[in-house]
Amino acid sequence: MGNMLEDYDHLLNIDYKKPYLFPLAGPESLIHTEGRRRFKLDGVWNFSLDVYDTFLRKKFFEERYHDEEGRDIPVDCDFDQWETVTVPSCWNVQKEAYTYYEGTGVYTRRFQYHGDGTGRTFLRIGAANYESSVWLNGEQIARHEGGFTPYMVEVTGKMKRENRIVITVDNTRKLEQIPSINYDWFNYGGLFRSVELIGTPVRFIKHVFLYLVPDGQYDKICLEAETAGFKAGESLKLEIPELGVAKEFPIGEDGRVKTVIAAKPRLWSCDDPYLYEIAASAGEDRVTDRIGFRQIRTEGKHIFLNGKRIFLKGVCCHEESMERGRALTDEDRLQILRTAKDLGCNVMRLSHYPHHERMAQMADELGMMLWEEIPVYWALMFREEATYRAASGQLRELILRDRNRASVILWGVGNENPDTDERLEFMSSLNKLAKELDPSRLTTAACLVNIDSMMVQDRLAEHVDVVAINEYYGWYYRDYQGLGRIMEQTKLDRPLVISETGADAAAGQFGDEEELFTENHQSKMYRKQFELSEGYVEGIFPWILFDFKSPVRMNPKQGGFNRKGLAAEDKRYRKMAFETVREYFDGK
Ligand code: GCU
């Protein structure tokens, strides 16, 4: 096939994308954004589906509207005449015809820039699923892979008074991606988080990371900072006014600062989500953040927050709105967090990919712990370097984005992946990377149960801090006793949590407790789960808070939705099981 294609390439231009495989932007492109000058490019953009990649094939980015003699020519790239959409958004919810579209969408707008020519300017794309490229005034300036994490590109000196930006987004599922081509959620496509310009001085602070030294003394804060353009010996100042911290530290040869400061902060917890205003300054740069200080650690089989043993009263949640796809608003996020609070949760598993950064900021403020994860989900091309690069890149981007968020206590490095040698190498490396990047959190993954020996048996279990299992006794396996045997027989030297358990229930369908898809059965399933896991696990995360769209759910009772929600997809209707779980959590 390869040779035959080469024979035809001169005719068919098979490799039309090759000139546009711009070097991928990754975690190294990210800089601290809190407290900076930010100019959002959100709002009305022009848009078109691009089913055959005509934008590239016909080089629309050149915007040629006239022939050599200056005469108008009929063009398809008359961007200003295209339909308009609001960014951020997902095209699937834009119109009925786009619901299941998988392919390229082209977003574009004009914008004026009134910079004074001093300092530096960076463009930040909050997230675009899955692969996106950016053109500014006709020049391709960035490309990124990964559907749920941000990337940036410097645009200093590239902008004029009047500018044209084009962002192409391609949500085609591909084998080598993270996730791969088969998963139990809806493949929303689009530019679904904010696009903005961020200004910095010429020399600036790239990153600031503050955390309580996790030694159980609660009396020291670690500062890790990275700067750009400063010489060794210049200083970076850290201010935490409420703690009386206002201290300068020398910047090293590598532009970094790593130091420990004596301080006894009021500790962040769900009941007291206390946040400190912090500021870091160097040269003409000054950045801020609001940071909570807490310690999460394991000891033996138990989990401790600030030295107090805790039980993770959790729930899983996708990032989805029926009206907005994945482009949630703060109101949507508040509704999700408040519903989890009503359920009695102290933690949420933001499945199965990084949610918007506002979720962790709001969880910081409301006092909700979070498990955040990357979509290393089910089977992947574990042997491929490109696949590992994608996974480790997404993990770095997530950790760099959210590591100052006290609410985040767990980094999840994977979910239910077949136990092979390649997968063990792949995921233990991701686990090691998370531990290296962030000593202030725990790692976890949904590991595997061996249903022959009826115990948790997964070689990954000895690498992660908290072993998690997804089990569906009472649903996929009707015999509950299997769960009892797993609980009795599993011997681990570290905490075990149930990261998923659940049963589908059609909202409003009632009947016998043994009748599948009834609310009665879903409620009974949870009663049995709590009865059989009590005392064996350090936490449980019902799958899932709300019903959600999934093309793999073809049972007529599901109708394209996974209906294991404790509440319906409208986020209002609460099923019987919601109260069952709330009662159990209330008693914990
Ligand atoms: C799996 C998987 C979920 C899925 C769930 C289910 O454990 O992790 O993403 O939705 O089971 O079958 O409903």
Image (cartoon, rainbow, N blue to C red):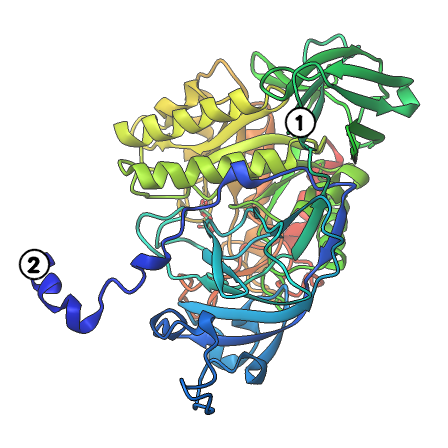
In percent of the image, x 30 and y 57: which residue is there? 18
Marks 1 and 2, how far apart at CA: 60 Å
Q: Position of residue 84 (x, y in %)?
A: 61, 79
How busy is the neighbourhood of tag 1: few (under 14 within 10 Å), some, or many (20 plus)? some
Q: In which image quadrant can residue 87 be found?
A: bottom right
Q: Amino acid at mark 1?
A: Phe
Q: Which mark is residue 238?
A: none
Q: Residue furthest front?
A: 69
In percent of the image, x 67 and y 55: which residue is there? 196
Marks 1 and 2: which is nearer the front?
2
In percent of the image, x 68 and y 61: which residue is there? 571
Q: Secondary structure at mark 1?
A: loop
Q: How many numbered circles does the render carry?
A: 2
Which residue is the site of mark 1?
311
Q: Secondary structure at mark 2?
A: helix
Q: Earlier in the sequence, mark 1 or mark 2?
A: 2
From the viewer's perspective, is 371 left or right of 369? left
Location of the N terminus by quadrant is bottom left
From the viewer's perspective, is 162 left or right of 515? right
Image vertical order of residue 566 relative to residue 284, above or below:
below
Q: Which mark is residue 3?
A: 2
Image vertical order of residue 547 relative to residue 579, above or below:
below
Image vertical order of residue 273 relative to residue 144, above or below:
above
Q: Position of residue 511 (x, y in %)?
A: 56, 63
From the viewer's perspective, is 387 left or right of 549? left
How busy is the neighbourhood of tag 2: few (under 14 within 10 Å), some, or many (20 plus)? few
CB of mark 2 near ligand 1 (< 8 Å): no
Q: Amino acid at mark 2?
A: Asn
User: For this rendering, which residue is in front, 551 or 291?
Assistant: 291
In percent of the image, x 36 and y 36: which residue is there? 388
Q: Is residue 364 visible?
A: yes
Q: Position of residue 156 (x, y in %)?
A: 62, 49
